[in-house]
Image (cartoon, rainbow, N blue to C red):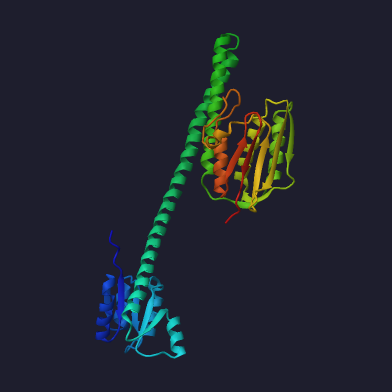
Amino acid sequence: MNEERLDILLVDDQNEDLLAHEAILAPLGQRIYKAKGGCEALRLVLERDFAAILLDVQMPGMDGFETADAIRAREKSRLTPILFLTGMRFANPDVFRGYTSGAVDYLVKPVDPEILRSKVDVFTRLARQRRELERVNAALADANRRLASTNQDLDAFSRRVSHDLQGPIAVIDGFARIVAEEGKDSLGPTNLEYLGVMRKAAARMGELVRDLLQLSRVTHGELAWTEVDLAEMALPILLELRRSSPGRVVETTVASRLPVRADAKLVKIALENLIGNAWKYTSKRERSKIEVGREPDGRGQTVFFVRDDGIGFDPRKTERMFQPFERFHSADEYPGTGVGLATVQRIVERHGGRIWARSAPGEGATFYFTLESEG
């Protein structure tokens, strides 16, 4: 694939110098434009985007310094490399003036062809890289705009789905409850059992819709960074679980302080899922343990964890467990939708962190995660 030809501008009031420099640069294969003075050069700069400008210093009327100042005043050509060509050695003040006018370098006439060609070749390579970077940035900006639009559509879709599904589910459950209550003396045990199955299915569908809506919401939107103490978050979560199961004997340990910079709402959702799973999967034990803490990873980064001594799982299934709807136990044995850990992973990754687990059947499970600070 042939590379894009770039534009080079030669500015000199001496026609023989223009022709000589054009011949020197011809092997580079770029398009050469020539101007015999500052005014003509400025007209061409307005029309084209040059990869490099070779500018003679000593010109009648508008000299090279004034021309360079005018080129630099235009936003589009503000960073265009300018190589000054001069037929005399400059005193230091003139050299300083040239560099403040935007000169990248000076060459004294008559120029060495190899040196001139190599310098201009470098400028064209840099220009090509800059333009490619601009194209990539433009593509990224366009992709970000489309992603933002898609996220808005997804958010609107999620709200619509939530409303359109939760409404009928509530109606099904409500009428099933009414029919069961009013017909408990006439429907018979089989029909009442059917109504119970219907209500149970409606409840599960409602839970699934809520979990999917939450999974959708945590994957986009700006993060509200703030100072968070995961220990302060974990304690009320555990307290609420104790209230929901007053007969259980669970020993809980939470580190004294677990500070981190994060989005408070999202990390609370993550902790609720992780601690809720630990509570759920220790429910078959007479006495169980749940621990929330941290430990160093040997690289100066803090690793947080939620650990339990519950039923555990086959470590070979670890990678699958963060996929939506992936379940290792039946819903009858351990209720849930299989969306919780996928939600946790999305939250952790949005914070620049990672999550992993260690376990073995019958030996409990530990979920580790990191949360990077705002960059």
Image quadrant in which you'd find residue 233: top right
Q: Is residue 192 visible from the viewing direction of this image?
A: yes
Of 111 and 246, the residue lying toward us: 111
Of 268 and 209, the residue lying toward us: 268
Horizontal side of 150 relative to 337 (left or right) equals left
Q: Work out whether 197 lies above or below 365.
A: above
* Residue at x 46%, y 46% (from the top left corner): 152
Task: Say which quadrant the C terminus sits in.
Answer: bottom right
Position in image of residue 97 (x %, y %): 44, 85
Image quadrant in which you'd find residue 186: top right
Q: Work out whether 276 lies above or below 65.
A: above
Horizontal side of 229 relative to 36 (left or right) equals right
Task: Say which quadrant the N terminus sits in.
Answer: bottom left
* Residue at x 59%, y 54% (from the top left corner): 374
Q: Work out whether 157 lies above or below 44.
A: above
Q: Is residue 30 visible from the viewing direction of this image?
A: no
Position in image of residue 18 (x %, y %): 27, 82
Q: Work out whether 130 lies above or below 258.
A: below
Horizontal side of 33 relative to 265 (left or right) equals left
* Residue at x 57%, y 44% (from the top left corner): 347
**Number of numbered discs on residues:** 0
Position in image of residue 112 (x %, y %): 33, 82
Position in image of residue 224 (x %, y %): 59, 51
Horizontal side of 2 relative to 189 (left or right) equals left
